[in-house]
Each structure stands twice: as C-alpha cells, then as structure tokens.
Image (spheres, rainbow, N blue to C red):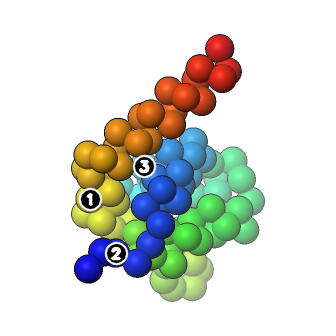
Amino acid sequence: MGESFDRDRIVDCMFDPVTSLILAELEDGKKECSYLAQKASIPESKVLERLSYLIECGFVIRSGSPDTFAADSEKLNSVVEDGANFDAAVSGLEKMDSYLN
C-alpha cells in the first residue's frame, strides 16, 4: 500500500525557500543544527521546527548530541520524481505566481 505521509505537505516543505536551503546543505552529508541555523540565518529551534515533519516521515534523520541532521536523498528524490506530484507542485507555483502578478 502507499506511504504513510502527506505527499503535498512534503512537497510544500521541500519547496519552502528556507527548508530547501537546509535540505541542499544536507545533500553532501549530515550537518549540525548550529551550522544549518547559521546558513539559513534562523535560530536553531526554527531548524528543528522546519524539519520536524520531514523527520517524522523519515525524509530527514536526526541524531546525536549536539543535534545533527542527515537527509534520506533517495526518499526525497522519490517524491520529486513522482510525475503527478511534480506537476501538482508546478501547477501550484504557477497559480501562486498568477495571484502575485
């Protein structure tokens, strides 16, 4: 049967500018929360807040002390590669763009 997560919510997380910046930092390996907070110019508590749903669904792995995060790139890519999902995300962005312009 299907995965136990809300695909739209995962895509929303991935396309959020701050969260996508954090995920980009995780592409080449795990990073400490303090490093990610500095890169994203947000407090450490906000890093955890932004990643919480991705952690809950296994897209990001949280470990250690201090907190470190690693991305499950394969799992993240599987969401992006899902054609219908990607089309829906593009459609949503186009719709948002039409409201803004």
Are there few (<14), some (14-19), or many (20+) residues within 10 Å of tag 3? few
Amino acid type indicated by mark 3: Ala
Q: Nearer the viewer, residue 61 or 1?
A: 1
Q: Which residue is mark 1?
A: 78
Q: Is residue 77 visible?
A: no
- Mark 3 or mark 2, earlier in chain: 2
Could you tell me how far apart the alpha carbons at marks 3 and 2 are, in whole angstroms? 23 Å
| Badge 1 or badge 3: first in the primary sequence | 3
Closer to viewer: mark 3 or mark 2: 2
Nearer the observer: mark 2 or 1; the answer is 2
Compare residues 100 and 26 and report the one nearer the observer: 100
Circle 2 — which element? Answer: loop
The image quadrant that residue 70 belongs to is: bottom left
Numbered circle sitting on residue 9? none
Residue plotted at (63% across, 69% down): 48
Q: Give the percent coordinates (x, y) of residue 47.
A: 64, 62
Q: Secondary structure at mark 3?
A: helix
Q: Which residue is mark 2?
A: 3
